[in-house]
Image (tube, helix red, strand yellow):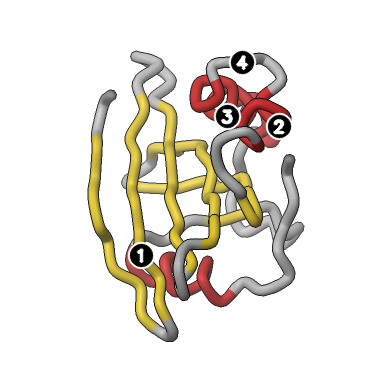
Amino acid sequence: MYRNDRNVDSFNLVNALQPVFRNTGCGMFEYDRKKQNETADSILRALALNADFARALKQYVRINSVRRVVQFDDGSVRYGIHAEFEGHNKINSFRIFKDEDTDAFDSYFYSVCDNKAELGKVRTSS
């Protein structure tokens, strides 16, 4: 399920709107990689409503890639996923972060076309 598409153009365009970091081995910030992996898995299980999220999600949507991401903001750390799936002539992306204290999710949906990314919708604490 965790497959990084070699083309990171869409990720970089969305990243200009909402900066996050992914595990590239550069070690710019300290974060808990185990928590990052566990959080990503729990987000995908919640999306699929199934412990076998890789198989369950394939029934509903074709996801090109899923990246584990970390967002640093004023001393706080948020763990989540960045996922991309193909639409008609564009790649659509979404990011979901999990709040550790409340187990709520913040979701951000983006439309990426050519060299432009736009934030389409935000759902917080759902």
Q: Residue at point 43% right, 84% down?
A: 114
Q: Which mark is residue 44?
A: 3
Q: Amino acid at mark 4?
A: Asn
Callout count:
4
Identify the residue under disc 2: 54
Label 1: how many residues lie within 10 Å, few (<14), some (14-19) or many (20+)?
some
Q: Quadrant of residue 124?
A: top left
- The percent coordinates of residue 7 (x first, y second) are 67, 74
Which circle's residue, 4 or 1, is located before the other in the chain?
4
Neighbourhood count class around disc 2 (C-alpha, 10 Å): few under 14, some 14–19, many 20 upward: some
The C terminus lies in quadrant: top left
Q: Image quadrant of residue 31? A: top right
Q: Compare residues 12 and 45 and report the one nearer the observer.
A: 45
> Closest to the observer: 118 or 38?
118
Distance Cα–Cα, label 3 vs label 2: 8 Å
Say which label, 3 or 2, has the lower sequence index: 3
Q: CA distance from mark 2 to mark 1?
A: 23 Å
At label 2, the amino acid type is: Ala
Residue tagged 4: 50
Q: Secondary structure at mark 1?
A: strand
For marks 3 and 2, give the one nearer the viewer. 2
Q: Is residue 15 left or right of residue 29?
A: left
Separation of residues labelled 4 and 3 (CA atoms): 9 Å
- The residue singled out by tag 1 in the image is 111
Q: Amino acid at mark 3?
A: Leu
Label 2 SS = helix
